[in-house]
């Protein structure tokens, strides 16, 4: 298994500002995934972050809005840029350990944009 | 777009009863997984069933998979109040990486 720490756990932000969410894993992993969960909804994959290369974004998500860093095999950040109330969501970091395909999740970062 | 569709969207039962949740998906898969999410928290992996398996058990959980119907079910037996949570199915797509596509989820409430 993997232990994943996310910071911040929650934040309230003003429209137009940016917030960076950090994700730290207790073991080295190849791929890290960032998901968004809008209120009362399911999870939608934003991007896959690979160490040493640019993140791969899913349809509907762009790097300018959600820049991602992956400086090493245990850490990643997701920035939510120029926020609007529609960005109010839980943002979840997850990793797989290259085995059966199950993912381990952080506790999420609950973002409220006013 | 979402791969999985769970039903029901919400389920309320009494402690001790069984809870059954269903999931349908659209494309070919490597495996199907079920996750649990307590309110406002991260997701916890419950069970994984591969595309060549038909049934799998883990404790009070029983999962079935019917690839011909592109559907799966999760049965929780002898439910407890602590089982109250949202349950999501997620599919690993054939030829894909470790990334998963999640269904909309079933919100289960177990009343004491």
Image (cartoon, grey):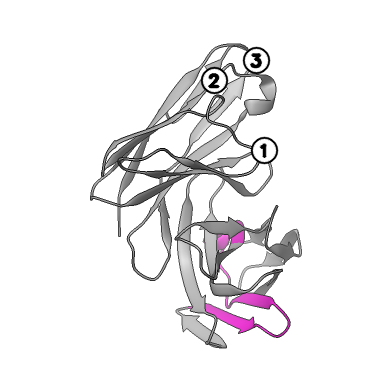
Image quarter of the C terminus of chain B: bottom right
Image position, residue A26 (x, y; %): 24, 47
Q: Is residue B63 magenta?
A: yes
User: Do the numbered discs 1 and 2 sit on residues whose CB atoms are within 8 Å?
Assistant: no
Q: Chain of mark 2?
A: A
- Mark 3 to mark 1 CA distance (whole Å): 15 Å
In this picture, which residue range is highlighted in magenta? B60-88
Residue tagged by mark 1? A39
Q: Is residue B93 magenta?
A: no
Q: Chain of mark 1?
A: A
Residue B52 or residue A61, whichever sits in front: A61
Badge 3 and badge 1 both on one subunit: yes
In the image, taking residue A72 as reference, residue B11 lies left or right, namely right
* Residue shown at 65% from the left, 76% from the top: B73
Residue A20 or residue A8, whichever sits in front: A20
Q: Is residue A65 visible?
A: yes
Residue A47 or residue A107, whichever sits in front: A47
- Mark 2 to mark 3 CA distance (whole Å): 14 Å
Relative to B99, residue A82 above or below = above
Residue tagged by mark 2? A81
Of callouts 1 and 2, which one flags the residue occurring earlier in the amino acid sequence?
1
Closer to us: mark 1 or mark 2? 2
Badge 1 and badge 2 both on one subunit: yes
Residue tagged by mark 3? A114
């Amino acid at each position: 298994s993997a232990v994943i720490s996310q910071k911040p756990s929650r934040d309230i932000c003003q429209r137009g500002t940016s917030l960076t969410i950090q994700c730290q894993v207790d073991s080295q992993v190849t791929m890290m995934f960032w998901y968004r969960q809008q209120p009362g909804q399911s999870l939608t994959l934003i991007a896959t972050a690979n160490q040493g290369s640019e993140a791969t974004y899913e349809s509907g998500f762009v790097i300018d809005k959600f820049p991602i860093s992956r400086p090493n095999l245990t850490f990643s950040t997701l920035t939510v840029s120029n926020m609007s109330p529609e960005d109010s969501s839980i943002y979840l970091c997850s990793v797989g350990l290259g085995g059966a395909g199950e993912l381990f999740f952080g506790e999420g970062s609950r973002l409220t944009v006013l | 777009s979402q791969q999985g569709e769970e039903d029901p969207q919400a389920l309320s039962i009494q402690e001790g009863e069984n809870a059954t949740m269903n999931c349908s998906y659209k494309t070919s898969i490597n495996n199907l997984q079920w996750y649990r999410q307590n309110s406002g928290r991260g997701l916890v992996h419950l069970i994984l069933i591969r595309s060549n398996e038909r049934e799998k058990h883990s404790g009070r959980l029983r999962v079935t998979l019917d690839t011909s119907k592109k559907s799966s079910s999760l049965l929780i037996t002898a439910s407890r109040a602590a089982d109250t949570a949202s349950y999501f199915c997620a599919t690993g797509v054939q030829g894909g990486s470790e990334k998963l596509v999640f269904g909309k989820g079933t919100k289960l409430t177990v009343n004491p």
